[in-house]
Image: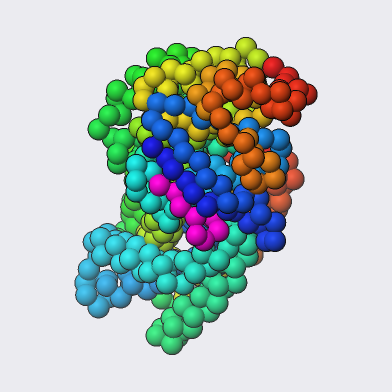
Amino acid sequence: MLEIARVSVAYGQHRAVDDVALRVAKGEIVVVLGANGSGKSSLLKTIARVLPSAPGGSVRLAGREIADLPPHAVVEAGLALVPEGRGIFGELTVRENLMLGAFARRARAGEAANLARVLALFPRLGERLGQAARTMSGGEQQMVAIGRALMSAPDILLLDEPSLGLAPLICGELFRALTRIREGGIGILLVEQNAKRSLAIADRGYLMAQGRLVGEGDAARLRADPAVQRAYLGHFDAA
Amino acid sequence: MILLEATLAGLVLGGMYALVALGLNLQYGVARIMNLAYGEGVIVAAFAAWWLYTAGGINPIFGLALILPAAFAVNWLIYRLALTPLVRRAKLREQLEVDSILATFGLLFVVQGLMLVAFGGAYYSYGFLSVPVVIADVTIAANRLLALGFALVLGLALYLALTRTRIGTAVRAVAVDPVAAGLVAIDVRQVAAASFALGGALVAAGGVLVSMFLTFNANIGVVFTMKALIVVIMGGVGNLLGCLVAGLILGLTETFVATWVDPGLTLAATYAIFLAILLVRPQGLFGRAAR
C-alpha cells in the first residue's frame, strides 16, 4: 500500500505539485489524469525520489516512511518507477537491462522466476535478449522498461505516460499487460493523457490540474461523469 | 627490420596509452570527473615503483601488488573528501565537469609541488629486466614486453569485469544514464566513487609499468593527462574498444614519426591525427553521436 500526503514540488517560485494526497492499494490500478504540465510527471518523480519534494510531505510504503530515502533505497523498499521517456539503457542489451532490474537485493532470490514472468508477459523480449535496447521499436522499448521495473519485484509500480508516442495496437497490448500485472498483486499508479484507455483498465482515478488534485473517484464513475468527459475524454482522446 | 622493431615499440607505447586512458575513461565516463591531475598519478606511481625497487629491492611487478591497492584507497579518499561536495552541489553534469576541472587543476599543482620537493626536477630511471630479447629477428628489452603483457592482462580483466558481471554492468549503466541507474536500485554515488578509485588504480598501474623502461621526472605528468584525454576523446568517451584502438594508433604514430621523420615532431603528429579523426568523426572512432 502506497500512501502519500501533503506532497509538494517547487521549481523556484512555481509549485508544480501542490499539497497532493493519494493512495494505491495492492492489486489495484490507479490512474492520475491531467493535461500537459499539470504536474503528473513531477508527482511520480518525487514519489520515486528522483526529484526532491518540498519539506513536510509524507510518502509511506507499507507504513514505512520513504520520503527521505535516496532513489536506490526506494527501489529496495519495493517501489519501481518506469519514467517518462522510458529511461532504459540504450547501449546495453535487453538481457542486461533486465538483469540490472534485479540489481536490488530484494530481487535477487526471485530473479529467475521474475524473468520467466516478464518473458511470459512480453514474449517478444525473449526473442531479442541479445539486442541493444536502443535498436528496438518504441513499444518494445516500453516493454523493456516495464520488464526491468518488474524485475525489481516491486509492491508498487509507477508508470509515467507509457502510451506516449505508441501506435494504438501496441498501446492496447501494453495496457492488457498492465491488467495481468495487477492480477499478480502489484499496485499500479499510472499517469496518463490517454484518459479513455487508462480509465478502461483502472479501478480508481484522480484528476489533476495545475499541480493540485481536483477530483477523484471510481473509474466507472469518472468515465460516466460529463465534466470528465468534456475535459479529458474529448479532444485528448486520440486512440 | 626497422619496421618490425618500430611496430613492436609502438605497440608497447600504445598499450601504455590505452591502459592509462582506460582509467580516465572510468573517471570521466562513469564518475563524470574531468581529472586534470590524472597524469600525476602516472608519475607518483612511477616514483613509488622506483623507490620500492632502489630502496627496498622490491621488483616493480610485486610493487604493483602494493601500489594498486594504495592508489585505489588514495583516489577513493580524494573523491570522498574533495570531489563529493562538488557532486552534491552540481545540478547538471556540465556543471560538475567545469567544477571538477577547476578543482583537479589545483590538485595537479599540489601533487606536482610535493613531488618536486621530494625528488627535485631531475630525471629518474632504474634498470629492471633491461635485457634484450630477440623475437623474429627483432630485439626488444624484456621489461617492455613485460609491460605490454601486464597492460593487456589488466585491460582484458577490466573488460571482462565490466561486461560479464552484474556490478560491472551496473557501472556501465551509470555511465549511460545515472538517473535511470538510481531507478534500478544502483547506488550511483558509491559506483561513481568506486569507478573513480578504480581509474586511479589503473593509472597507477600504467605508471609502474612505464617506469620500467622510460625515464621520468616530477614535471611530465601533464603529458600523460593530455595523451589520455586525446585517446579517450579519439576513441569515443566511455568506449573501451575505442580506448584500445586509439591508444595503439597514438603509440604507433609516435614511434613511426620518431623513427622515420623526426623525434621532435611526435607531438605534432599526435595532434594532426587527433584533428583528422575528429573532423571525420566528432564523436570519436567508436562513440555514438549524441541523440
When asked about the image quadrant of residue B277, the answer is top right
Q: Main secondary structure of the magenta part?
A: loop
What percent of the width, then of the height, locates residue B95?
A: 63, 62
Q: Is residue B242 visible?
A: no
Q: For residue B117: magenta? A: no
In this orientation, does residue B272 appear? yes
Q: Is residue A95 above or below residue B159?
A: above
Give the image's coloring scheme: rainbow
Q: Is residue A114 above or below residue B49?
A: above
Q: Residue at x 63, y 21 (%)?
A: A223
Nearest the eye: B181 or A51: A51
Q: Nearer the viewer, residue A57 or A121?
A: A57
Name the spot of residue B163 as percent of width and height, x first.
Answer: 40, 37
Total marks shown come to 0
Question: What residue is shown at x 27% (from left), y 72% (from top)?
Answer: B52
Q: Is residue B97 left or right of residue A146?
A: right
Viewer-side residue, B258 vs A135: A135
What residue is rendered at 33% in x and 72% in y?
B48
- The residue most toward the left is B57
Q: Is residue A58 magenta?
A: yes
Magenta region: which residues? A50-60
Q: Position of residue B47 (x, y in %)?
A: 37, 73
Q: Quadrant of the C terminus of chain B?
A: top right
In this image, B166 relative to B265: left or right? left
Asked if residue B77 is positioned above or below residue A11 in the image, the reply reads below
Q: Residue furthest right?
A: A235
